[in-house]
């Protein structure tokens, strides 16, 4: 005979926890998803420009890297503001541990991007080798991890999406 108490799934029991639909959105399109493309693309562009500087020695590429990493930081902060607003305002997002994992990854990533930008101020050429390039390599890896995890939130856990059959427009 099975003597275990009845098991229950809190997400099934409490309907409010099912609500994971994005609130920071334009006509249902989450702003966070629109913004994250910029820091992701610019972080990888920074690494590309650093490698081209190492290859050619042309100061043009170290300047491209410095501008790209500044753009990655500025757009990353905007993406983080919209993501954090979702996290705090939407109950179903706030209550899922994977959302907080993504938050921690993103804050670590933004610190790396910010550091990589600050070390280049005033001396874009001298900052690239070896510290700038090393930071760009770690930054690109962290960007891939954070972006992959963000995609997991949406495509595996349906975070930020409208529940199937929802009547809201
Ligand atoms: C504090 C910072 C952040 C928080 C709290 C956060 C939170 C979230 C949340 C709640 C979602 C689910 C979709 C939505 O509700 O919009 C999401 C998706 C996503 N996040 Fe973040 N995020 C943060 C920063 C970042 C950063 C810096 C990146 C860039 C690497 C990023 C990459 C992604 C990606 C790629 C998705 C999937 C978007 C899609 O395909 O629709 N997030 N994030």
Image: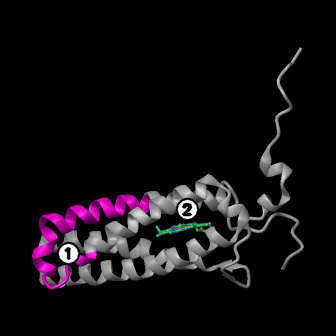
Percent across and percent down for residue 22 are: 70, 73
Percent across and percent down for residue 40 are: 43, 71
> Is 127 covered by the magenta stretch?
yes
* For marks 1 and 2 on the same chain, the one whose residue lies earlier in the sequence: 1
Q: Is mark 2 within 8 Å of ligand 1?
A: yes
Percent across and percent down for residue 83 are: 57, 72
Disc 1 secondary structure class:
loop
Disc 2 secondary structure class:
helix
Q: Is mark 1 within 8 Å of ligand 1?
A: no
The total of numbered circles placed on residues is 2
Task: Report the front residue among 88 and 165.
Answer: 88
Percent across and percent down for residue 82 are: 57, 77
Q: How is the image coloured?
A: one colour
Residue to which mark 2 is pinned = 150
| Viewport quadrant of the N terminus | top right
Q: CA distance from mark 1 to mark 2?
A: 28 Å
Where does the magenta region start and end?
Answer: 117-144
| Viewport quadrant of the C terminus | bottom right
Residue at figure coordinates x 16%, y 74% from the top left: 53
Res 112 quadrant in image = bottom left
Taking the image as shown, residue 102 lies to the left or right of residue 115, namely right
- Is label 1 or label 2 in front? 1
Residue at figure coordinates x 13%, y 64% from the top left: 130
Residue at figure coordinates x 27%, y 71% from the top left: 115
Q: Quadrant of ligand 1?
A: bottom right
Per the picture, the main secondary structure of the magenta-coloured stretch is helix
Residue at figure coordinates x 65%, y 62% from the top left: 94
Instruction: Point out which mark residue 119 bears.
Output: 1
Taking the image as shown, residue 59 lies to the left or right of residue 147, namely left
Image marks 1 and 2: residues in contact by CB distance under 8 Å: no
């Amino acid at each position: 005979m099975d003597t275990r108490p009845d098991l229950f799934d809190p997400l099934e029991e409490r309907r409010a926890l099912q609500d994971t639909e994005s609130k920071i959105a334009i006509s249902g399109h989450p702003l966070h998803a629109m913004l994250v493309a910029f820091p992701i693309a610019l972080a990888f562009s920074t690494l590309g420009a650093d490698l081209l500087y190492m290859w050619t020695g042309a100061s043009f590429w170290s300047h491209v890297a410095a501008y790209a990493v500044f753009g990655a930081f500025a757009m990353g902060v905007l993406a983080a503001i919209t993501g954090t607003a979702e996290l705090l305002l939407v109950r179903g997002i706030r209550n899922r541990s994977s959302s907080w994992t993504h938050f921690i990854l993103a804050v670590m990533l933004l610190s790396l991007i910010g550091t990589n930008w600050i070390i280049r101020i005033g001396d874009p050429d001298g900052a690239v080798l070896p510290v700038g390039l090393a930071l760009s390599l770690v930054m690109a890896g962290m960007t891939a991890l954070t972006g992959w995890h963000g995609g997991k939130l949406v495509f595996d856990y349906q975070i930020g999406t409208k529940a199937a059959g929802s009547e809201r427009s």
